Amino acid sequence: MISPLKVCIKSLGGEFIKVPWRRLTCNNQGNPKWIFILYLTIHRRLYTMDRLDKWGMHTDQVCALCKQELETHQHLFFSCNIAARIWRKLLQWMCITRNTAGWTEEMDWAISHATGKATQDEVYRMTLAAAVYYVWQERNYRIFQKKERTAEVIIRSIIQEIYCRSSMQPKLAEFIRNFNYYP
């Protein structure tokens, strides 16, 4: 029997559908900063150059990382040469063999393959959040500080952070010990 209180709460709150990407952010062991940037990226709310242009802020719309194409979410997250190299190496480090693609394709793959409770899925979600955060951080670093790091330095930083965060949970620590430390 359903309690009257539950019926009242349900009628006041309404029904909400579960979004397919919820496990990418809600069940992520990554740094909260990573998860927040991942959340903004999923909603396409990061201030990429194409969004700034739509608001009337006329800036150079070329990608700050590769300096070849227009900066959009789709391009910046894993279609850009530098971001694709970072993501490809991280996939290789996680023993996932597939080609990298743009943001939409990566999200589709993540939703269909990495939303389970398996340890490999947890590591993938954490790595995705870290990669998105570090690519966004590098983009901002190049725009605002006029300095740049190589893809290898960024990859090394991501892997070190994931090792540190995983060491707090025995299941993740055991799983990650089997990985190549640096790809």
Image (cartoon, grey):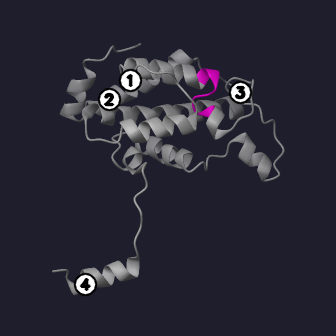
Most foreground residue, 141 or 52: 52
Q: Is residue 53 above or below residue 74?
A: below
Q: Could you tell me which secondary element the residue under label 3 belongs to?
A: loop
56 relative to 140 in the view: left or right:
right
For residue 154, say whether it is visible. Answer: no
Say whether disc 2 or disc 3 marks the residue closer to the N-terminus. 3
For residue 5, say whether it is visible. Answer: yes
Give me the residue at 32% from left, 80% from top. 9
* Residue range of the region highlighted in magenta in the rendering: 76-82
Question: Residue 53 in the image: x percent, y percent?
Answer: 79, 46
Locate residue 79: give its quadrant. Answer: top right
Please name the residue that numbered disc 4 is placed on: 5
Please name the residue that numbered disc 3 is placed on: 146
Which quadrant of the figure contains the C terminus?
A: top left
Locate residue 170: give its quadrant. Answer: top left
Give me the residue at 63% from left, 39% from top. 73
Could you tell me the amino acid type at mark 3? Lys
Which quadrant of the figure contains the N terminus?
A: bottom left
Cβ atoms at labels 1 and 2 below 8 Å apart: yes
Q: Could you tell me which secondary element the residue under label 4 belongs to?
A: helix
Name the outermost residue toward the left. 1
Say whether disc 3 or disc 4 marks the residue closer to the N-terminus. 4
Could you tell me the amino acid type at mark 2? Cys
| Residue 40 highlighted magenta (yes or no) | no
Please name the residue that numbered disc 1 is placed on: 160
Q: Could you tell me which secondary element the residue under label 1 belongs to?
A: helix
Say whether disc 4 or disc 1 marks the residue closer to the N-terminus. 4
Give me the residue at 23% from left, 86% from top. 4
Please name the residue that numbered disc 2 is placed on: 164
- Distance of mark 2 from mark 3, alpha carbons? 29 Å
